[in-house]
Amino acid sequence: MIKFFRKIRQKMLSENKFRKYLIYAIGEIILVVIGILIALQINTWNENEKSNEIRDNNYTQLLEDLKTDKEYIESIIKEYNTNIILYKEYLKSYKTPNLTLNDVMDNQNQLDFSVTTIRFQNGTISSLENTGEIKLIPSDLRKKLTDFKRNQEFATETNNDGNKFFFDRMEIAGITGSQPDFQNRIRNQPLLKEELGIKDNLPKIIGSIEISMLYKNFTERETVYNLEKLLNNIKEITELIKREQNK
């Protein structure tokens, strides 16, 4: 009988010891899991902080680029609007009766024959696309930036294609002596004009300049329209970035 109770007692002690060990093991496992979760949380927090820092730096650089582009676009619009007005005044000159070829040539020489090659500050957007960091930016803002860059490229292509056509036409016209600077240089050189056949070439010169300036005016008006759209893009993007910065 005594042996029986001893066996029961030993069994209870063994079961109690196992229970304590099991509780201890479970406690260790829980501590390990908690440690892993804390480590993952810290790592996630660090990654988020790093992403936020990168995003904030990109926002700052984007705002600087947009500011530079805004000032640049406004200067181009001002320049082109001046040329557009000048061309309108030139067209009005034809209301004067009995114009001679020399009169028309003199009026044409008052036009602006210079052209502008457009270049934008889209380096930050391109960098974001190449590095993949653009994914850190909210989708609505990301789409605005992508569309903005596409609009920049379209405005640049439209303007530069127009410039090329203008240069091609002026090159043809220049062979006949139509460059304004050259005309001014030989203004007091009647013998040279005669030897070059400038007088005989005047109809061709005037016609060449007409079509050149017509297309230049069209290009400038189209570019102004595209640039004004870009200014609206800049305003919208700037507001979105500042909204994100204030979150």
Image (tube, grey):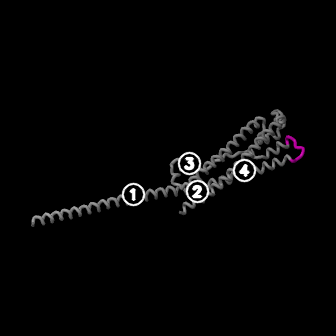
Task: Give the residue displayed 82% in from the left and 33% down from the top.
Answer: 197
Q: Say which element carries label 1.
A: helix
Please give the label number shown on residue 80: 4
Disc 1/disc 2 C-alpha distance (Å): 34 Å
Q: Position of residue 164 (x, y in %)?
A: 69, 40
Foreground mark, 1 or 4, reads 1
Between the C-alphas of marks 3 and 2, the distance is 15 Å
What kind of residue is marked 1? Leu
- Counting residues from the start of the chain, the first of labels 3 and 1 encountered is 1
Residue linked to disc 1: 40
> In the rendered structure, which disc, 3 or 2, sits on the residue that comes first in sequence?
2
Is residue 213 found inside the magenta-colored segment of the image?
no
According to the image, label 2 marks what residue? Answer: 63
Say what amino acid the circle numbered 4 marks: Tyr
Q: Quadrant of residue 5?
A: bottom left
Kindly report the secondary structure that dominates the magenta region of the rendered protein: loop
Q: In what quadrant of the picture does the N terminus appear?
A: bottom left
> Measuring 74% from the left and 38% from the top, which residue is drawn there?
169
Along the line of sight, the residue nearer the viewer: 61 or 38: 38
Measuring from the top left, give residue 210's x and y in whole percent.
79, 41
Dot 3 and dot 2 residues touching (CB under 8 Å): no
List the residue tagged with mark 3.
126
Mark 2 is on which residue type? Leu
Question: Answer yes or no: do the residues labelled 3 and 1 have beta carbons within 8 Å?
Answer: no
Spatial separation of the CA atoms under disc 3 and disc 1: 33 Å
